[in-house]
Amino acid sequence: MKIDHRVVMTFRQILLMNFGFFGIQYSFGLQQTAINPVFSMLHANPDQLPILNLAGPVTGLIIQPLIGAISDRTWIPSLGRRRPFFLMGAIGCSVCLFLYPHVTELWMAVLLLWLLDASNNTAMEPYRAFIADKLPDEQHATGFLMQSFFAGLGITLANVSLYFFQRYFTAVTDEGMPVWVYGSFYVGAFCSIATVLISVLTTPEIEPTPEELAEIQAKPHGLVAAVKEIYEAILVMPKTLWQLGAVYMFQWYAMFVYWQFVSHSIADSAFGRSEATDPKVAAHLYEQAVAWTGLVNGFYNVVTFLSAFVLMYLARKYQAKLVHAFALALMSLGLCLFPHISNKFLLFLPMIGFGIGWASMLGVPYMIAVAEIPSGRYGVYMGIINMMIVIPMLLQTVSFGWIYKHVLGDDPGAAMTCAGLLLLIACIATLFVSTPHMPRRDNFPMKNRTQDKA
């Protein structure tokens, strides 16, 4: 008889355990919206943006599976298995975000992005496994989609902060960096560490039994053991995860295209930058477009955290893959319409479908995957799932610069359309994923209960 130590948690408890995800995603939101404009302000060309963003996929490919495998073999008294990595990552994020506005050269911005992304990956990876560790099967939908809620909220506030600070802080430093950049990144530095501390202090991890602790301590530790664990887990990876990998290939390639070129698309379609002949006027129009991009991205993330609760219900009532396919279809439609809208206010309409799709991407696939993952390997498999995210991003960084320049004719609007078509392919691929039976409802009793499993 194997005892399952996971207990049903109240809605408030699930909210608190995921609150740190808000700060992590605030940092990620700044990466989405503010990093590429900073590169452009430091005189990077648009076709250089994919390769300059190489840090994200490379650090994710290396760090997340390693952190996952190592955390599976970790137990630190008073901290636990996953929480030490939340803290290390959050501290790194806060330091990098504080320093980022002070960069004066492009190479400095790129180097700091590598450090920031490494910290984000260290904090983010164990959070997925934390949900599977703590919550019983029937509450996985709420746990993962609560992360979608906080991801949407964190990214929303990160994007809105760009617009707010640009509106009220219009000065420029002697080095040419707008003052509004400082405000956004300083707030991000505070949120990263503060929210993670709240989750760490309010949500203890499940302490292993003496037998389980002995098993953890008996496992080989270190980098070589972690790499071997990743390799062995890939060899026996369930069929469902391989099928999800095909979906991820298209949807995450598309997302990287969107994040890199959305501000340039808005600058051309809604602010008329492509018609400007004066470089100073074009630069000013682009800065306005960056601020508006913050609002557009903030809006779709508002949709994300609001629709997350609806997706919780739908994913329990219907097949999770059908919910995800529908969300991706809405996302694809929105992105294909996006570059053809010249009124900046109407740009928010296609973002409704985009936000629903983003909420699904952040939660529903994890619900599908975790039902197939052995409980003792939550960490390493969550890292492998992240490899499925960063591999298409890596391919995008090394391939899309050439595609953008030689196939799409340096047209950011065409890049948006290309991303929309890739999301449509991901939608179709989702329909072919084999989904196991998944729990249909969540419970929130006033008292916790212990479950026994044979």
Image (cartoon, rainbow, N blue to C red):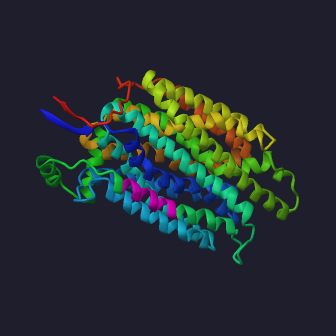
Residue name at image x 53 percent, y 65 percent:
97
Is the magenta region chiefly helix, strand or loop?
Answer: helix
From this view, report whether residue 436 is shown above or below residue 374: above
Residue name at image x 68 percent, y 65 percent:
180
- Measured from the top left, where is residue 241 in percent x and y? 38, 34
Q: Quadrant of the N terminus?
A: top left
* Relative side of 194 to 377, left or right: right
Residue name at image x 42 percent, y 44 percent:
15
From this view, report whether residue 309 is shown above or below residue 345: above
Task: Find residue 338 and report its image quarter.
Answer: top right
Find the residue positioned furthest to the front: 446
* Relative side of 318 to 38, left or right: left
- Measured from the top left, where is residue 326 in percent x and y? 56, 26
Q: Quadrant of the C terminus?
A: top left
- Measured from the top left, where is residue 122 in percent x and y? 40, 57
In terms of depth relative to the viewer, which is nearer, 35 or 412?
35
- Measured from the top left, where is residue 139 in percent x and y? 36, 34
- The stretch in magenta equals 190-200
Find the residue positioned furthest to the bottom: 174
In terms of depth relative to the viewer, which is nearer, 76 or 377?
76
Is any part of residue 410 visible from this angle? Answer: no
